[in-house]
Amino acid sequence: MALRSVDFEVYGRVQGVFFRKFTKEQAEKLALKGWCRNTSRGTVEGQVQGPSEKVDEMMHWLKTTGSPSSKIEKADFRNGKDISEYNFSNFEIRRDD
């Protein structure tokens, strides 16, 4: 099974609206691993790893859905690459940077 890793940063009203909690729940629903955290820039950033089609689903969710109270302006994705194994054992919410 081909695994993929991608870094993300989501802009808009994404802090204080349970965005990280819903991101973790969505990642777990898709069986993805990685992390997310709030940034001092007012964004949420992180990394997801998993099967390519599930990573694509997560990227779409980060761009268009988010938490019920969030207002996503844009989502940037970078450092997308194929990986041979996971670097994380689960999906976690990290402390703010």
Image (cartoon, rainbow, N blue to C red):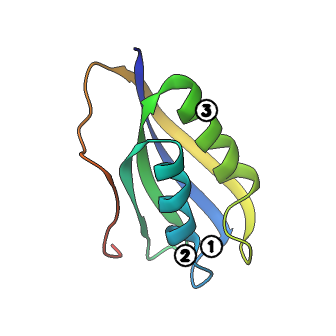
Q: Nearer the viewer, residue 65 or 63?
A: 65
Please rate how many residues cluster around mark 1, counting C-alpha atoms within 10 Å: few if below 14, some from 14 to 19, many from 20.
Answer: many
Query: Mark 2 vs mark 1: which is more N-terminal?
Result: 1
Q: How many residues crowd around disc 2 within 10 Å: few (fewer than 14), some, or many (20 or more)?
A: some
Q: Quadrant of residue 48?
A: top left
Q: Nearer the viewer, mark 2 or mark 1?
A: 1
Q: Is residue 8 above or below residue 15?
A: above
Residue 16 at x, y percent in the picture: 58, 85
Characterize the local packing of mark 3: few (<14), some (14-19) or many (20 or more) Cα atoms within 10 angstroms.
some
Which residue has dot 3 on it?
56
Q: Which mark is residue 42?
A: 2
Please state which of the two labelled residues, at mark 2 or mark 3, is closer to the viewer.
3
Q: Amino acid at mark 2?
A: Gly
Which one is earlier in the sequence, the residue at label 3 or at label 1? 1
Residue at coordinates 55% horizontally, 33% vertically from top-left? 54
Quarter of the picture containing the C terminus is bottom left
Q: Nearer the viewer, residue 79 or 94?
A: 94
What distance separates the C-alpha of mark 3 from that of mark 1? 20 Å
Disc 2 to disc 1, C-alpha distance: 8 Å
Q: Quadrant of residue 93?
A: bottom left
Residue 61's x, y, as percent?
A: 68, 49
Q: Amino acid at mark 3?
A: Asp
Rounded to the nearest whole Å, what is the CA distance between mark 2 and mark 3? 24 Å
Q: Secondary structure at mark 3?
A: helix
Q: How many marks?
A: 3
Q: Is residue 60 left or right of residue 29?
A: right
Q: Which residue is mark 1?
A: 14
Residue 19 relative to residue 50: left or right? right
